[in-house]
Image (cartoon, rainbow, N blue to C red):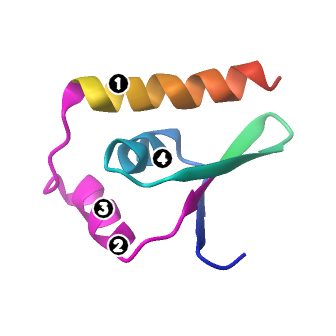
Amino acid sequence: MENRWITHDLYIAAFCLANGMKLLDTIRYGSRVKFVFEDTPTRHKIISGYFNNTLPVYPRIYRESLQTLKDLIFQEE
């Protein structure tokens, strides 16, 4: 799976989506979901910004990204 990055963390996934990373797919395993993103050279900066609170994100965009991911989780059940 070249050029793909996968996470099961909903909040990190929403942050990545809000910062422009492209969601490619979801993978369901049991009651859990993995989010598959197109990997980019800026991924490390985005993840670091999430954990260190150094990369700002607009609250409304983050909320919309989070809701989009939740909708994907629950529509596939």
Q: Which mark is residue 63?
A: 1
Pointer 3: what residue? 46
| Label 2 Cα neighbours within 10 Å, binned few <14 / some 14-19 / many ≥20 | few
Expressed as whole percent of the image width and height from the top left, the position of residue 1 reads: 72, 75
- State the extent of the magenta-drawn residues as a range: 36-59
The part of the image, by quadrant, that contains residue 6 is bottom right
Expressed as whole percent of the image width and height from the top left, the position of residue 25 reads: 69, 49
Measure the alpha-carbon separation of dots 3 and 2: 5 Å
Pick whichever of labels 3 and 1 is earlier in the sequence: 3
Circles 4, 3 touching at the beta carbon (< 8 Å): no
Would residue 10 appear left or right of 29 to someone viewing this image?
A: left
Secondary structure beneath disc 2?
Answer: helix
Residue name at image x 36 percent, y 51 percent = 20
Circles 3, 2 touching at the beta carbon (< 8 Å): yes
- Where is 33 relative to 60, above or below? below
Residue name at image x 71 percent, y 42 percent = 33
Secondary structure beneath disc 3?
Answer: helix
Measure the alpha-carbon separation of dots 1 and 4: 12 Å
Amino acid type, residue under disc 2 in the picture:
His
Measure the alpha-carbon separation of dots 4 and 3: 11 Å
Circles 1, 4 touching at the beta carbon (< 8 Å): no
Measure the alpha-carbon separation of dots 4 and 2: 13 Å
Pick whichever of labels 2 and 1 is earlier in the sequence: 2
Q: Which mark is residue 9?
A: none
| Label 3 Cα neighbours within 10 Å, binned few <14 / some 14-19 / many ≥20 | many
Pointer 2: what residue? 44
Secondary structure beneath disc 1?
Answer: helix
Measure the alpha-carbon separation of dots 2 and 1: 22 Å
Quadrant position of the C terminus in the picture: top right
Amino acid type, residue under disc 1 in the picture:
Arg
Amino acid type, residue under disc 3 in the picture:
Ile
Pick whichever of labels 4 and 3 is earlier in the sequence: 4
